[in-house]
Image (cartoon, helix red, strand yellow):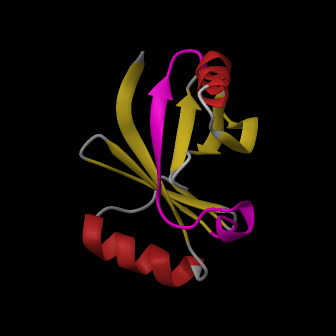
């Protein structure tokens, strides 16, 4: 079971330019502003900018499904034929992420908060 899609991460090549664009769009300042990730929160949605996303195989925005058991959901997706892009990794504050590619090349992200 999921808690829905609450996070979307965009791969970006120019983090400063992308940060300016999303700041203008969302009219909020980032809650995380690091060279490796910029994150915004708006209307219950978490919007992230990843300057390393293209190098990790991100071909476009990745929706992240919030789950309570990331390892179990990841195993279920792999058993259903998904291709592993990023194994479970802690990204800070107890948050863990993982991502897969489905049979049509669509990216699916998973996130579990501590």
Looking at the image, residue 114 sits to the left or right of residue 22; the answer is: right
> Residue at horizontal 58%, vertical 21%?
73
Work out which quarter of the rendered image holds the C terminus and state it: top right
Q: Percent x, y for residue 102?
A: 55, 45
Q: Percent x, y for residue 55?
A: 74, 68
- Magenta segment includes 14: no
Q: Is residue 15 depicted above or below 36 in this figure? A: below
Q: Percent x, y for residue 2?
A: 41, 21
> Residue at horizontal 27%, vertical 64%?
26
Nearer to us in this view, 62 or 45:
62
> Residue at horizontal 54%, vertical 81%?
16
- Magenta segment includes 52: yes
Work out which quarter of the rendered image holds the N terminus and state it: top left
Nearer to us in this view, 76 or 12:
76
Give the quadrant of residue 72: top right
Q: Which residues are magenta?
A: 51-69
Q: Is residue 68 depicted above or below 45 in this figure? A: above
Q: Percent x, y for residue 31?
A: 47, 52
Q: Is residue 95 depicted above or below 15 in this figure? A: above
Q: Is residue 113 depicted above or below 103 in this figure? A: above
Give the quadrant of residue 94: top right
> Looking at the image, how many numbered discs can be counted on the residues?
0
Nearer to us in this view, 26 or 112:
112
Looking at the image, residue 91 sits to the left or right of residue 3; the answer is: right
> Residue at horizontal 33%, vertical 45%?
45
């Amino acid at each position: 079971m999921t808690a829905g899609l609450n996070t979307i991460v965009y791969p970006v090549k120019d983090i400063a330019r992308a940060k300016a664009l999303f700041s203008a769009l969302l009219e909020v300042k980032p809650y995380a502003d690091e060279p490796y990730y910029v994150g915004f929160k708006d209307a219950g949605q978490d919007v992230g900018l990843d300057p390393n996303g293209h190098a990790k195989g991100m071909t476009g925005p990745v929706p992240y499904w919030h789950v309570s058991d990331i390892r179990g959901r990841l195993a279920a997706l792999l058993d259903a034929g998904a291709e592993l892009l990023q194994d479970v990794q802690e990204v800070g504050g107890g948050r863990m992420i993982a991502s897969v590619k489905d049979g049509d090349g669509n990216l699916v992200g998973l996130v579990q908060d501590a």
